[in-house]
Image: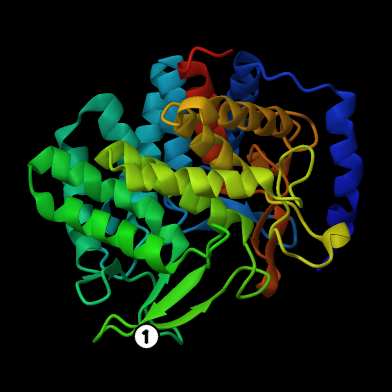
Amino acid sequence: MNNKPILLIPVLLALAFVFKPILNVKNAMEAVQRQLKRGLLAHTDTLAFPRSTNPNGSLNAVPSQDWTSGFYAGNLWQVYEYTKDPFWKRQAERWTAGLEKEKMNTGTHDLGFMLYCSFGNGYRLTKKPAYKEVLLQGAKSLSTRFNSKTGCIKSWDKVKWGFPVIIDNMMNLELLFWATKMTGDSSFYKIAVTHALTTMKNHYRPDNSSYHVVDYDPQTGKVLAKVTHQGFADESAWARGQAWGLYGYTMTYRETKDKRFLEQAQKIADFIIGHPNLPKDKIPFWDFNDTDLAHASRDASAAAITSSALLELSKYAGKKGATYKQTATQILESLSTPAYLAKEGTNNHFLLMHSTGHRPHKSEVDVPLIYADYYYIEGLRRYQQMGLK
């Protein structure tokens, strides 16, 4: 793999401070719209969903069954909400339609990402009955992966582990909470809460960092292993994993008002914010415990997820809220500089540069990732909705 882009990162990061970042949501969202419009002209196959950039520089587009497939439509829905322009609604509807068949997919835990980011945003903004039906069927499909012995939703099939559960899975619980609110059927809610409690018990270390994967015995619920798949080491703090947990427990508190989840979210936030290896611009290295930080790639996707989560958490966290809001703002400011926000017409029309997907497998290292763009837009919107500018 060509490592030259990674070596350029320190230079680009220095530029961020030359430009003296001051967050301006209006300017950032105008840049978002210009880039997305170029992308819509370039990417016309609505069954090939933009995910990243291939090693040769071409667009990596994926089918609907890929876990990232729902984010592109989600980006369009979010821009529609911001602008109220029917153009964005039409584009969002076009890119959402091709995901419908995934409502029957019982082979993945990622239906929240795939369906809630697309159909979920669509239903929230349009109240289309057809969107609601897709989401409810998706929640039923997701529920089939819950095992009462383990107290968790199974993450992956056909892997070396018996019943692996990854921290990312916290993000998919929002679809289940929504399903209970729509139907009155508490079974979805109970699954989500049980999964969150089990994950809190088994995924987290005394320092409030998270393992990536916990493997269970599906017959007894016994924990068999605590390991990593995408992180630096089994005992390391993979940056995006910490962000998924922060976002997931903040959302779970919102949906349950159970203070145990608020306390957990705050513990995770404090771990991230207080980590000595968090760079000054608040964009984390791909893993907090990489032993060669001088050559470690950053992860803008982890930063974007963290910023969006911290903004929401700041509303619930009392005195700590100011610190969380400040850190979230710093992250969004950094992401909105030329160090991370791509120049219009470049970057395969993705918004953010310098994300890391799966570094141990040398996959998607120092590239754009569609979910980084999604949570960046969400962070900008949340910032504005909080009365900030």
Q: Residue at x 52, y 67 (%)?
A: 212
Q: In this view of the protein, which residue sits in the foreground, 79 or 145?
A: 145
Judged left or right of residue 191, residue 45 is right
| Image location of residue 344, percent across then percent down | 72, 30
| Other residues around mark 1 within 10 Å, as few (<14) / some (14–19) / many (≥20) | some
Is residue 282 depicted above or below 7 in this figure? above
Q: In this view of the protein, which residue sits in the foreground, 240 or 310?
A: 310
Image mark count: 1
Q: Residue at x 73, y 32 (%)?
A: 334
| Image location of residue 251, percent across then percent down | 37, 41
Q: Quadrant of residue 148?
A: bottom left
Looking at the rendered image, the quarter that the N terminus falls into is: bottom right
Asked whether residue 45 appears in the rendered view, the answer is: no
Q: Outermost residue, left direction? A: 184
Query: What residue type is disc 1 on?
Result: Gly
Residue named by callout 1 = 162
Asked whether residue 314 appears in the rendered view, the answer is: yes
